[in-house]
Image (tube, helix red, strand yellow):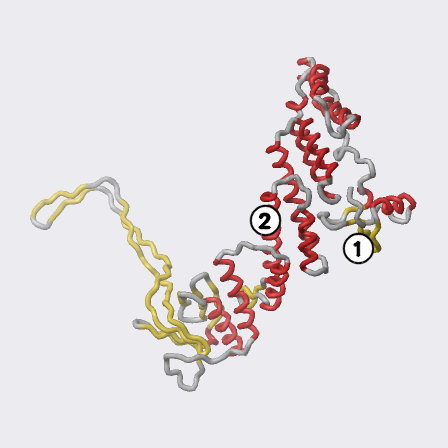
Amino acid sequence: MSTEPVHIARAGVEIGAWAPDEVRSKLASGELKPTDHYWKPGMAGWLTLAVLPATVRVLPFPRPVEKGANLLDGMLGRESYQAGLLAVWDLLSKAPTQCLIPEEAWASLGEKLGYDVRKRCREDLLKWYRQAVEAYLSDRYFAPQEKTDLGNLARSFGLDASAAEAIHGEAFASYCRIGMLTVLLRDIPPQQKREQINLLGKEVPLSEEKVKETFGAAMQSYFEQRLKALMRQEDGGEVMDPAAYAAFASEIKQMDINLSMDDKLVDRIDSAQRLWSLCRSPLKEVPCELDLGNEGCFWTQHVELGLNKRVTTRRSYGGFGTSIKIWGPLRYRTGSYEVERQTEQRLEKVDSGILVFTSKRVIFSGSLKSLNFKYAKVLDVTVYNNAIEIDKDTGGDVVFFFPSGQAEAAVILRRLVKQAKG
């Protein structure tokens, strides 16, 4: 076990740091309480002193509960499943070499119980092994003796290297996520956080590549959580404070952590920061192709106009029928025939042109259609991934399709509508 200082906290406040043996002494004298918490760099999180490992390590999983044999066991003349687990636990607790049961002991146990214990009880033995890995991780990292104990336990339970490593990886992934979050939330410099994160993977019985992969997944998860916390909904769009994101990005960079961000995520972050500034800065007039008189232009772009149209389709239904020519254009038809008309709303692109938001109204000037309505008529603005929909109190709703910038346009439009309506 490590001899570095152990940090102690009571009621959420750190009260000191002492060597492990001194902590055990204070705990025995009553100066420290079992309900106090302890932590040291590399641990996944704070634990109560009640679970502080003793100087001599005991089995990291409890002794099974005794149960009698079932009917099938009696018919087959063998001991119960639980008897096998109890026998294995007792052998491990008394083994001269920690966590190691010799092969001859397994053979003898099989003859006594009437079945192959490692085969029949495999699922529970795997659970025990996983509990051992989690227990050894929880108080720091895999110390040399703990690595030896795990190796002995894997051999005892008949686990090959790949099976043992898979369990190590599962346990380490969970431990790493919790441990990394504990470190990252501490009020310490980024470089110190990086050092403590590195301790999480020290001496773990996994390949360097697997440790790096687990760190990457844990940091990616943390980044996504922080990003979600930084993002806010405002004026119907996703916004993010550029200063807060810059501080977070600087911290990540100082910790020398590489993140995977695709183009879509980068665009989302950039857009959220632009919208944050746009929501808070004064609206500015921009040049416009149209002659607006004394009205200012606050946004303009070439777009496509979409309108909801009522479309009626005719569907014919008929049974078997035929048509016989009688004379000239006259024909005689036999069989059933029925016509049904269905009317539905369809959104269709009907024109392209210039869309302008002035100080008083929305103007669209296209080659086929022109629209002009005041902000007082606007009820709502909905943003889509390539368009905005404007709900009006009269005259029908309109949709404008954008090549880009629809989120920014929606923010400006909402602000103008609010100003117009007071």
Picture quadrant of residue 386: bottom left
Q: Amino acid at mark 1?
A: Gly
First in residue order: circle 2 vs circle 1: 1
Q: Is residue 227 left or right of residue 60?
A: left
Q: Quadrant of the C terminus?
A: bottom right
- Secondary structure beneath dot 1 equals loop
Q: Nearer the viewer, residue 331 or 281?
A: 281
Q: Nearer the viewer, residue 81 or 56?
A: 56
Return the residue at label 2. Answer: 217
Could you tell me residue 65's position as x and y percent?
76, 28
Disc ID at residue 12 = 1
| Residue extending farthest right | 29
Could you tell me residue 368's position as x and y percent?
30, 71
- Secondary structure beneath dot 2 equals helix
Q: Quadrant of the N terminus?
A: top right
Can residue 198 be seen here? The reply is yes
Q: Is residue 332 above or below residue 368?
A: above
Can residue 65 be seen here? The reply is no
Disc ID at residue 261 = none
Could you tell me residue 144's position as x and y percent?
73, 38
Q: Residue at x 74, y 29 (%)?
A: 99
Q: Is residue 76 above or below residue 58?
A: above
Crowd class of label 1 (few under 14; some 14 to 19; many from 20; radius 10 Å) = few
Q: How far, Cα to Cα, is label 2 from label 1?
A: 29 Å
Q: Amino acid at mark 2?
A: Ala
Q: Is residue 60 left or right of residue 352?
A: right
Q: Is residue 96 above or below residue 244?
A: above
Picture quadrant of residue 75: top right
Q: Nearer the viewer, residue 126 or 141?
A: 141
Could you tell me residue 35's position as x and y percent?
83, 47
Q: Residue at x 52, y 65 (%)?
A: 270
